[in-house]
Image (cartoon, helix red, strand yellow):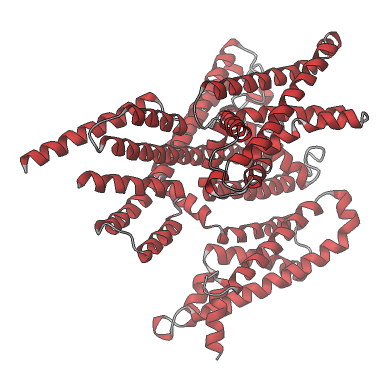
Amino acid sequence: MTTGFKTTLMEVLDGSPKHTASRYVEWMITLVVLVNCSAVILDSVPEIHAEFKDFFHELEFWSVMFFTVEYIARVWSLGAKYSRENGGSWKGRFEYMFSAFGLVDFFATMPHYMHMFFPALDLRILRVLRLLRILKLSKYNTALQDLFHAIHSERQAFGSAVFLLTIATIVSASLMHFAEGHHQPEFFGTIPHSIYWSIVTITSGYGNVEPLTKAGEAIALITGFLGVCMAAIMTGIVASAFSNQVARKKAAFEAQLREVFKDGNMSDEEQETLRRLQAHYRLSDEQVEAMMLRAKNKSSAND
Amino acid sequence: MTTAVPTPSTYQRIKRRTFEIMEGEVPDKYSHFVEIFIALLVVANVIGIILESVPEIHEAFEHEFHLFDMFSVAVFSVEFVMRVWSYSEKYIHSGGTAWDGRKEYVFSFYGIIDFVSTVPFYLQLLFPGADLRVLRMFRLMRIFKLSRYNSAFEDMVAAVKAEKDSFSSAVFLLFISCLLFSSLIYIIEGHEQPEIFPSIPAAMHWFVITIISGWGNVDPVTFVGTILVIFTQILSIALAAILTGVVATAYTAQVERRQALYEMEVRNVLSDGVVTEEEQAQLKIMQAKLGMSDEQVEAIKHQMEEEKQISDANKQVK
């Protein structure tokens, strides 16, 4: 009896499409998180804080209760993830507690209790930890995970871009320090100071400080131009990461398509399979249509 | 009107012709003329609105501007009425009622634009006390009439729609980083620069400016603040890159789909071995509709012919 309930609760909290309740739970958590984050933001405005202090306090208390119940329910129900032979109930629980989402869930709730026991704690750190709750939402955004996968697969290219950025920053900062250090010691007096200037210039194309010497002007221009190049390199890497990811998914989908078109006609069942695959790979209708047309073109060319 | 009449009356013929000219589906001289005339009038209108906002020009040519606006409103009103009237033809042959086509037009994007950019003028005639700035804004909506003749706007919307998952995740990323970074900078620098970071909303303003331009007009005072600002600036490049990448992928997918569609049409045309005059025209229309360049079309045709030769050679061998 309890085991059945535990499994159901685990599936519902995990967002499994088997139960309609899982969607409501997802919406509920999203709503509470959004209300919470808005409250933290509004609470920082002195006028609003003065007027609604008690309300925000109440809200915080009830949200912490809500998140605590959620956390406990997750930990308890994940005991059903592995059977006794596969490691027992604590294996699933520890797995969750030390995963990224589990840590976020923990740190989004725990500071409130810390504050109860140690009232002398710095309030500002508590606020940052409260904002971590927004990260709870990323669990429900699978497209975001896709994005990170795409970027992760191009990490070498990213690494070299960051390397280039570092070199460009250090070289331009040191040059600027030698050219302008004596004229504007408050901005270029040390190389770490000029590093800040060169990052601003690389990212925005225009620095926070105007150079005074001719040499400084030339270096500023070149640094600004480097910024444009950096943006182009980064864009190129991300774009190719995306298209590589799409190409991988397409190759898998196309293999399935070819299988379907082999016998010449498409049954309802096959159509259903393709639709499910399309949703799984997150391919747009346009891409699928293009692939289908191409597959048809090919099969008619072979005839 | 809904009953099928074997021989259409003159009234219906005129209506059908008006619909064809307005819709511009069938390429002919008159619809081309109407298109160019309306497009030019829209461009002149927009230039007029821009010039009118300069006080000296406004004073010198107030009367001329007024006359021109009256003329444009008259033309656009006639255009709107003619469209509503003639769009009853749209579904008449496929079994719909006259009001199906009209309703579709009136509630479409262009129908609403046509309406909104013209009607405020009449409102002003009826209620002369209306705010002129609001009216001017509505008049600027006329520029959207141009997008009917250019698929760029639709392409963009379609691309965003096709990649809505990636877009929403990029926006989500932006949202999360906005919240986290602006709260962090508020907590770290709020005490040092209370006039710039008095609250998290103020810090969010700083964050958005930094993400867009790379530098938010504020220099951090503390060491941790500097590190945070540097991270934000690098994030601004990364986010721009992600958005660009998403759009680029979406566009590539669209171009691919069009090429595949066109390829299929060419294959159909070439299947019987001869290309008739009619088929040639059909391909031309298709090329214009899909917005493909002559080079792309040439490449596809060339490829088709090569494939055909190869398959012919294969047949001879057999």
Say if residue B215 shows up in the picture: yes
Q: Position of residue A107 (x, y in %)?
A: 64, 64
Depth check: give the residue in front, A131 or A37: A37
How many labels, in total? 0
At x 72% / y 23%, what residue is drawn? B75
Give the farthest residue toward the top.
Answer: B60
Q: Residue furthest left?
A: B317
Q: Quadrant of the N terminus of chain B?
A: top right
When the figure is inspected, residue A147 is found, relative to residue A210, above or below; the finding is: below
Residue A68 to residue A200: above or below: below
Q: Is residue A41 above or below residue B59?
A: below
Residue B160 falls left or right of residue A29: left
Residue A9 horizontal side relative to residue A249, left or right: right
Position of residue B306 in the picture relative to residue B77 (left or right):
left
Residue A223 screen position, x and y as percent = 54, 23
Residue A266: horizontal and vertical position, in percent?
Answer: 33, 60
Spot the residue most to the right: B129
* Residue A151 appears in the figure: no
Give the residue at x 72% y 30%. B141
The image quarter in which residue B215 lies:
top right
At a point 79% along the width and 44% down the height, the residue shown is B191
On the rendered structure, is B310 left or right of A1? Answer: left
Which image quarter is the C terminus of chain B in?
A: top left
The quadrant in which residue B267 appears is top left
Q: Position of residue B69 (x, y in %)?
A: 78, 20
